[in-house]
Image (cartoon, rainbow, N blue to C red):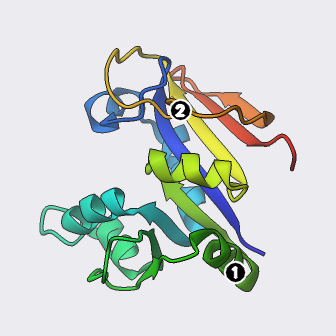
Amino acid sequence: MARIVSSFFISVDGVVESPDEWHFPYFNEEMGTWVQAGMASAAGFLMGRKLYDEWFAYWTSPEAEAGIAEMFNAAPKYVVSNSLEKADWANTTLINGDVAARLRELKEQTAEGDFQVSGSATTVRWLLANGLLDELNLLVHPIVVGRGQRLFEDTPTHPLKLAKSETWTTGVLNLCYVPATA
């Protein structure tokens, strides 16, 4: 059975918005290897409507980095949205209606791999609240951003258990959490 795994570049003060403005000075080979391993284990990419719109616009544009764009364009993508009527990006499936039931079916029908969620803070909060998130990876960057959307804003309590952790040479903490009930 597949899992739903979420990963965020996050600042010490919890900001996940616009990591392109603060994340890159901390990107190194350690992080690159970790990101590649996550992509290699992907059964597909799960995203909310807003991230879908952003990624579709970017990864299908001539400005997108060729190798990564080819991978994203070919990969299975699943968009959680009850407002999107059709998805024009190749290999994209809409998940709507009873989203929780549809995602449970998708996990059960997929023999191996992870459905990767990169970004989509609102979707991740919803997945966690509905018992669908299997793993939460936080790459905590040693920077205070001071403004922007935080991962958890006005969120109910969800106990988590630290499954593994490591510190990279840039000072980034790689923290892997699972729901405490798992």
Mark 1: which secondary structure?
helix
Dot 2 crowding, Cα within 10 Å, few <14, some 14–19, many 20+: some
Residue appearing at x 58%, y 58% in the figure: 38
Q: Position of residue 123 (x, y in %)?
A: 50, 53
Q: Is residue 20 above or below residue 44?
A: above
Q: Secondary structure at mark 2?
A: loop
In front here: 89 or 36? 89
Alpha carbon separation for disc pair 2 and 1: 27 Å
The residue that mark 2 highlights is 152
The disc labelled 1 sits on which kind of residue?
A: Glu
Q: Which residue is mark 1?
A: 105
- What amino acid type should be assigned to the residue bearing mark 2? Phe
Q: Residue at x 35, y 18 (%)?
A: 145
**Residues at marks 2 and 1 touching, judged by CB atoms closer than 8 Å:** no
Q: Is residue 182 above or below residue 152?
A: below
Residue lying at the far right of the rendered structure: 181
For marks 2 and 1, the one nearer the N-term is 1
